[in-house]
Image (cartoon, grey):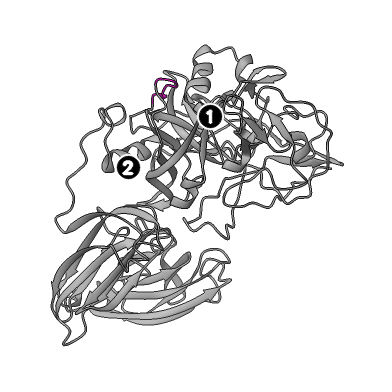
Amino acid sequence: MRTIISWQRRQRARFLAGIGLSLVSASTFALSACIIDDGSGSIGDDYGDKYDDNIGDIDQTHDEVVYGIDNRTDVFDHGDVILQDRAIDSTVALMNPGDFDDSNPNDVHFLGQSLGQRLNLCTSERFRDDPTAAFCSGTLIDDDLVLTAGHCITSSSACNNTRFVFNYFRDGANSLQTVTTDDIFACTSIVARRQGVSGGQNLDYAVVRIDRPATPRFAPAPVRVDNLPMSVGQPVAVIGSGSGVPFKIDDGGSVRESRSGTLDFFVATTDTFGGNSGSGVYELDGYTVAGILVRGETDYVSNGSCTVVNECSETGCGGEDITYVFPAIEHYCSVATSDRLCGALPPPPPPPEDSFDYQARDTSSAQQNTVNQTVVLNDGDTLEFGTCGIAGSSFTGDTFLRLFRNGVQVASNDDNCGGLGSNITFTVPAGQGGAYEMRAGCFSNGECNGRVVFAITPDGGGGGGENGAFDFSASNTSSATRNTVNENITVSAGQSVRFGTCNVAGAAGNGDTFLRLFFNGTEVASNDDSAGCGLLSFAEHTAAQSGTYQIRAGCFSSRTCSGTVAYVIE
């Protein structure tokens, strides 16, 4: 009987964990005996549909799987010359500096166990003798730019500890291509990154800059610049380091779901594994990068005393999720330039009138070296400003915002909108009108950049309507169907009620909130994740009947969350 193995995961996989280290030559690799894995290793970097940039407790974690026939092929053995070129010229393995020994610059050695040792694979399994040095994959898309998954490089610190290794592939059945230090590049900065729900799209990408041009030694892969859905049934290929092994090419997948309504990711039947995260996924008509592999099904299952690859039919299991490449390129081109990447895109729209851009580092959580903007507010005015949660705002990295009056802080925010962006809503108390200063920086001493957009609503924005708010803290609410915190409000027929943990002055939330509205015991409105609010909630309803309505505040699934539900009746 096969049972799915539950593997421990960390934010960045290190395949060196476990029982001992073995030295693997980059030019040859000897067969090693199998040992039983102790379960302490991480074999995937792939996250479920509901997550935020603070990678911690993730309820829905998935890896990848083989669909139908296992189409993974070593680079030397693949019959498509163009895909071979993409693997040799454009594909990188993401490694930590401790994953290899470069003491001989002309013959780099990879440290770690073989795949068979690391995962206690059965003797029937393929690629058992391959090294497992990589934790993610990526694709060169410009002279000094690499495209990968957002969850592969999550911060400036992660960037500093990441190396991009070309030529990590087999050049024969029993040998690896020689890797030199000229083939290894360092990460210098994260230029554009998203991980989580933003503007109704579930995105996971990063465009990072490396320490020197990789060209002409290597060649960037062309990217798909059209913001159009893939076609269901369209064949695709993926190239990367599944389970950390040298590059494999799989050209047997096809698109199962295009998600044409959101154009955030598509679902395909690629034979991919943990370590393929960040891999370039190519459309075979033109061989352009159409997406980035980010998550999927379980990798391996137990088969008696050893493990085997998890196999699904071509129509079975959930498929592999692949972030469309267009949002990543569009984001990059909004903050940087590239003739190769941005020439075919329309120019970005002008920034909102009430906004300011900033780039900062070493701000000690926005307490020094900040970029500041002053606004004049009257008593009762409501100011909202943020790098997220307000139209036109954007950010890369972990932003931090503060608001001051006469040198005294009156509000601050680190993480909002279900990620590492920041958003503050502040209403001026009576007698406190005057000049206020917004200060934009980064969490701790990291590096970040963004566009802060702000909006001022005079006199609280009530417009003669009734405003209110209530705080809540909840857990195990089964998506706000039990154990909720409730508030009764009186609404007349024809009036509208707007309520949320976002998008309403005074609203706030932590975690994944869920709101519902009831009248006479019948639900009339609900919301989980509101567009542009990440994991926070907003809903509105126009009353057909007068009477008492009840707002019920809870959390998605059985999670824990808290916040302030603000509402306006008008």
| Residue that carries the numbered disc 2 in the rendered image | 331
Q: Secondary structure at mark 2?
A: helix
Left or right of 62 on screen, residue 192: left
* Left/right of residue 553 with respect to residue 225 in the rendered view: right
Q: Residue sitting at 56 percent across and 59 percent down?
A: 56
Percent coordinates x, y for residue 292 in the rendering = 47, 36
Is residue 39 visible in the rendered image? The answer is: yes
Kindly report which numbered mark, 2 or 1, lies closer to the viewer in this rendering: 1
For residue 542, above or below residue 337: below
Amino acid type indicated by mark 2 = His
- Amino acid carrying label 1: it is Thr
Towards the viewer: 306 or 536: 306
Q: CA distance from mark 2 to mark 1?
A: 31 Å
Residue 181 is labelled as 1
Q: Which mark is on residue 48?
A: none
Span of residues in magenta: 216-222
Q: Name which residue lies at 27% across and 75% down.
A: 568
Horizontal arrangement in the rendering, residue 95 relative to residue 364 (left or right): right
